[in-house]
Image (cartoon, coloured by chain):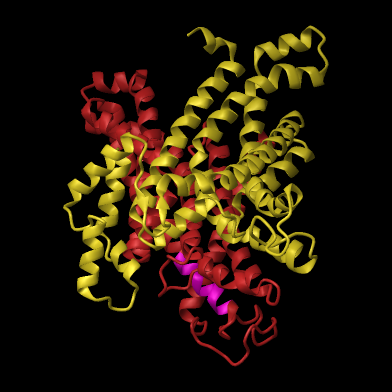
Chain colours: A yellow, B red
Amino acid sequence: MVVTAATFVLISLAPGNTAQVLAGQAGADPEYLALISERLQLDRPLPYQVGSYLRAAAQADFGFSVIQGRPVRDAIFARLPASLLLAAAAVLLAAILGITFGVLAAARRGGVVDAAISVSSLIAYSLPVFWLGQLLIALFAVRLHWLPAGGMRSADEPGGISDVVRHLVLPASTFSLLLAALIVRVTRIATAEALAEDYVSAARAKGASERRVLLHHALPNALRPVVTVLTGYLGIVLTGAVLVETVFVWPGLGRLLYDSVLSRDTPMLAGLLLFSAGLIVIANLFADVLYRVLDPRTRFQ
Amino acid sequence: MTPRLLLGSRRFVLGTLFLLGVLAAAVFAAVAAGDPFGTSETILGEPTSAHPFGTDELGRDVLTRVLSGAATTLKVAILPPLVAAAVGTAVGLSAGYFGGLLDEILLKLMELTLVVPRFLIALVAAAFFGGHLWLVGVVLAATFWPSTGRLVRAEAISLREREFVEASRSTGAGSVWIITRHLLVLVAPVVAVNTSFQAGQAALIEAGLAFLGVGDRNLVSWGAMLADAQSYLGVAWWTSVFPGVALALMILALNLLGDGLADTWNVRGRGRL
């Protein structure tokens, strides 16, 4: 609720409104402007606008986006699959890479492997996603012609799954590198800490192999902080999506949000912010469930 | 422990050196380099001795622009995080030490900034009000300080129960004395680490906004240069590579600095972002 109200206030404070965008930039007829404003109830006072929005939103009606020419809900759901596909591919890839290298670095703590992994994850973490995306496009799309530079399907012959996968490779890799670097850093520290615990010494004393100690005793306990950090970084996943989707012209929610900002599409923007806030809340709930799976101690609380 | 400390300080030294390099570039650009908006006849020219980094689509010298972009990124990376550090430390210390209403307000603010990512707030603000650098700075400072405040608060809560605070109080020291003389010094490492990471994030957000075309159009920004370069990736790699390397080095420098500080002072939990 606070998010919605803040969005409305922020948007209405700004110069320019939806009516002006709709009527065209170059000096529209004031009467025409007034007509549009009246139609969209933009002439009503702000508290009225916020109030009627919240009433409708409580019934899962997020309003109608005049710019998009369809209800906000439909516009969001139309873009959602592309966003989920990109995010799922990136997070999955990042989790596999990040946990593998993080555990490897922790197991070889202080050695050459650890140093190499730490330094490369720090560098990967410092690369701006949009620049990394450009480099990958320049190399794999422009120079080598291996993969398409942008979009989600080919324009000339929109094929099936393989076509989408080909388009997915570059944006997903770009996105996942940032996340993987983050996961490596957290996994490394958490695993190293777990390895110093008494139960690891006990497992070693029992005669468990180093591999078993690492994968069965240390890793499960190290995953908890990884989940915490990843949930905390969900905001980054959303904002990273705006930039990645812009570089690769990926038809997801990030791009929709950016377009809505530029076109002063208040209902669309409010809907998107509400949706992303909801997503973060759901992710936190999901993380709580994961804690229970990962840490038996929390199951009985 | 020695190799770790050594590695830590090495990161710190490297980060500081990179940062000094960016600072030197900014100073050089202000004093000696040419006009970053000046054009030449060579459009999208390859790197030559006259234009070591090549020229862009309007014939502007990429090296001059990279140098003058350093000032933009430094301003946004230094000032807002420092303001946030000051405000966050002050509020966090008093909230943690005294508890009560202030404490609850701080926590509520913290939750709000967790739900709405600050890049989105900055994006909306910049798009609607024009992306003046000071505005971006204000948004960043306003969204950074609650996270600093939360870290400081947690530290202050654990510190206020310690014996030395008790001892100080028993000798008649007032709250202000205890906070400024004892607690401030002890929370400083956490704040310093957090602030360096925030600085890296600030640089990244400024570049991201400029890349999306809502940055400050009157200033040279590496992010805006990258946005311009997007259309010429196939024909003029230099328009993307040089500003990109500069930006990546800047952020790397700040992350190195933060890592170095965290390792040296043994700051756990690393208050990142």
In the figure, B258 relative to B33: above or below?
A: above
* Residue furthest to the left: A45
* Residue A64 in the image, given as x and y percentages of width and height: 36, 50
In the figure, B43 relative to B80: above or below?
A: below
The image quadrant that residue A259 belongs to is: bottom left
* Residue A164 in the image, given as x and y percentages of width and height: 70, 51
Q: How many marks?
A: 0
* Residue A250 in the image, given as x and y percentages of width and height: 59, 55
Out of B25 and B136, give the one closest to the viewer.
Answer: B136
* Residue A168 in the image, given as x and y percentages of width and height: 69, 51
In the figure, B229 relative to B73: above or below?
A: below
For the point 71% across and 51% down, which residue is it?
A169
* Residue furthest to the bottom: B41
Out of A54 and B178, give the one closest to the viewer.
Answer: A54
For the point 50% across and 82% down, which residue is it?
B32
> Is B64 in the magenta?
yes
Residue B267 visible within the image? no
For the point 23% across and 33% down, which residue is it?
B176
Figure quadrant of the N terminus of chain B: top right
> Is A144 in the magenta?
no
Which secondary structure type mostly characterizes the magenta part of the structure? helix
Q: Which residues are magenta?
A: B63-72
Residue B201 visible within the image? yes
Q: Going by the image, does B179 lie left or right of A80?
A: left
